[in-house]
Image (tube, grey):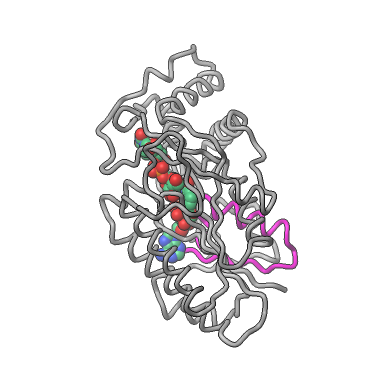
Amino acid sequence: MKKILITGGAGFIGSHVVRLFVNRYEDYQVYNLDKLTYAGNLANLSDIEHMPNYVFVKGDIVDADFVSELFITHQFDAVIHLAAESHVDRSISNPMDFIYTNVVGTANLLNAAKAIWKNSSADHLFYHVSTDEVYGSLHNPDEFFTEQTPYDPQSPYSASKASSDHLVRAYHNTYKLPVVITNCSNNYGPNQFPEKLLPLCINNIRNNKPLPVYGKGENVRDWLYVIDHARAIDTVFHKGKVGETYNIGGFNEWRNIDIVHLLCQVMDKKLGRTAGESAKLITFVTDRAGHDLRYAIDASKIMNELGWKPSLQFEEGLEKTVDWYLTNTNWLESVTSGAYQNYYAQQYK
Ligand code: NAD
Ligand code: DAU
């Protein structure tokens, strides 16, 4: 049985990746290593936690001895590394957590993989899941981020992810560690922590609270449904070329103010409110420091070389997402109250 370590599997994207791998590949033993920070929620995986090919390991990737011991004990064949501090605003108020987890944590995983794969000719892979934010901000409307775009990170979060990408490439160049990197655009969908724009606004509309739009709402993001990102990771894991980078995105750019208006329309319809009611909650607030203007991914390489493409139109994905949050109000309430943090204690006594 192939042993795959997935880090950060209790988080938003990681939980969709773990579910996909556990359900699709019975011959893989999937280990989910997660520290269960505020962003980690094992309830995200309650439907698959009793599957025989799934193992949860609670631990911190910043702890080098723990990580090294884990690799020696389990002799993983491959790693899909998603564990990270992921929220830009938190990186502005508390950058050090990002440097420890995203930079030091990634280096610990690279060292542990290098140590156990040293003399082996087997088919190993260290897959780093990264972000389009490493490329900085686009100012020319005709430009897209390609795999050749120079790195120009602007926030402590994106600088920490850029650092970890550089380390991953350095271990490939120097030690021949078999690596692959993907840089993806903004994800949306079920199980996203309600600090990020879309789930925050969904929750605030439900509760008739203001919808904080930074600056004038003119910043542009490129949105991809999280399950399409998980499908892309599956594709690159199985078909990607070692040493390569693949950009992942939906060719789906929206100004923040426009996406919030669209969300308000969907929410009015779903909640049976009169048209325009939710939009009255929109409130322009002080801009994020160093706010990147526009991200837009050119995803031609993964589409042309590996045959991946998004499965959902954005309007359909947004409606599915709203339906999920309105059906799973218990999930939202346990996350906003903090009660979800008892899940581990109750399930793993
Ligand atoms: P998330 O914040 O929802 O989840 C992160 C997970 O990592 C959590 O379960 C958390 O408990 C775990 N974790 C954090 N620190 C840890 C540590 N020290 N040791 C072990 N586990 C730890 O993040 P997400 O939005 O699912 O993002 C996952 C990955 O994808 C990140 O690497 C992020 O940079 C990248 N990414 C995210 C997006 C996006 O739109 N959310 C887009 C592109 C790339
Ligand atoms: O591009 C990929 C990145 O997308 C990932 O690497 C990050 O992990 C992920 O958090 C996300 O970063 P963003 O900063 O783009 O996502 P966020 O949801 O925080 O913000 C989206 C846009 O909305 C951004 O321009 C800031 C703005 N915003 C955000 C919040 C939370 C607001 O206007 N108001 C808000 O309250």
Q: Quarter containing ligand 2?
A: top left
Front one among 30 and 258: 258
In the image, residue 199 above or below residue 184: above
In the picture as drawn, the residue positioned furthest to the top comes out as 274
Q: Tell me where residue 84 appears, x and y as whole percent.
A: 43, 59
Q: Nearer the viewer, residue 228 or 178?
A: 178
User: Residue at image x 64%, y 61%?
Assistant: 240
Left or right side of 21 for 110? left
Q: Give coordinates of residue 102: x percent, y percent.
A: 39, 63
Q: Is residue 29 magenta?
A: yes
Q: Residue furthest right?
A: 26
**Which residue is at the front of the view, 238 or 211?**
238
310 vs 69: above or below: above
User: Does residue 18 show up?
Assistant: yes
The answer to whether residue 86 is above or below residue 65 is above
The span picked out in magenta is 6-35
Residue 60 in view = no
Q: Quadrant of residue 244?
A: bottom right
| Image point (64%, 54%), residue name | 19
Q: Is residue 165 magenta?
A: no
Farthest-out residue, bottom: 119
Locate residue 201: give its quadrant. Answer: top left
x and y, in percent, of residue 277 in the image: 43, 15
